[in-house]
Amino acid sequence: MTLRTEVAEQDEWSYSPAVGAGPLRFGMSVDEVVAAAEVLGRTTVGDCARQHAIFSPTWKIEVNRRGVAPSPPAVTAYVSQAAGLFCIAVDAAQGPQIAYDGLPLVGRDMAGLESDAIA
């Protein structure tokens, strides 16, 4: 089953543990994430509700593809005031293909991914 109908060169991002994925680097500020995410499309920045006073203010950044009818965000990033970018979530159908050391990670069944990772 193919989830993606069209893949462009810029839609292939590599993942580096503790570094980031594609143009997004862990530790980036909200403004840096918004600027880097422009390769995919338009961004929306919203505040995340603080459940406890001890947590740093956090923002949710959703990136939607340009020219695509309303759909789920291609990428969702979370940025805290204290740590910067700390989470990158990629939509399997709308987002870029993410690979780690040449191994595709997004839009795959878990058994195939596990088998390829072990090999």
Image: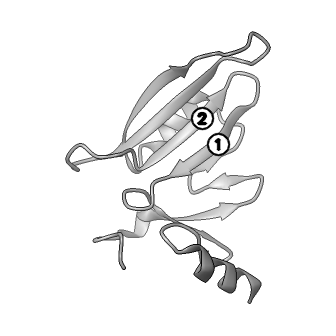
Place of residue 23 in the rendered image (x, y in percent of width and height, measured from the top left): 56, 51
- Tell me if residue 76 comes above or below residue 8 in the rendering: above
Label at residue 119? none
Badge 1: how crowded within 10 Å, few (<14), some, or many (20+)? some
In depth, the one of 8 and 100 nearer the eye is 100
Q: Which residue is drawn at 53% across and 75% down?
A: 109
Instruction: Tell me which amino acid carries mark 1.
Output: Cys
Numbered disc 1: secondary structure? strand
Numbered disc 2: secondary structure? strand
Q: How far apart are marks 2 and 1 (CA)?
A: 5 Å
Label at residue 87? 1
Place of residue 72 in the rendered image (x, y in percent of width and height, measured from the top left): 35, 46
> Decide: marks 2, 1 in contact (CB < 8 A)?
yes
Position of the C terminus, as image quadrant, is: bottom right
In depth, the one of 48 and 82 nearer the eye is 48
Instruction: Tell me which amino acid carries mark 2.
Output: Tyr
Name which quarter of the figure residue 31 lies in. top right
Position of the N terminus, as image quadrant, is: bottom left
Badge 2: how crowded within 10 Å, few (<14), some, or many (20+)? many
Residue ranking furthest to the top: 53
Give the left or right position of residue 66, taking residue 53 as reference: left
Give the left or right position of residue 20, taking residue 41 as reference: right
Label at residue 78? 2
Place of residue 33 in the rendered image (x, y in percent of width and height, measured from the top left): 55, 37
Q: Residue at x 63, y 31 (%)?
A: 79
Give the left or right position of residue 64, taking residue 56 as reference: left
In depth, the one of 11 and 46 nearer the eye is 46
Q: Residue at x 66, y 17 (%)?
A: 57
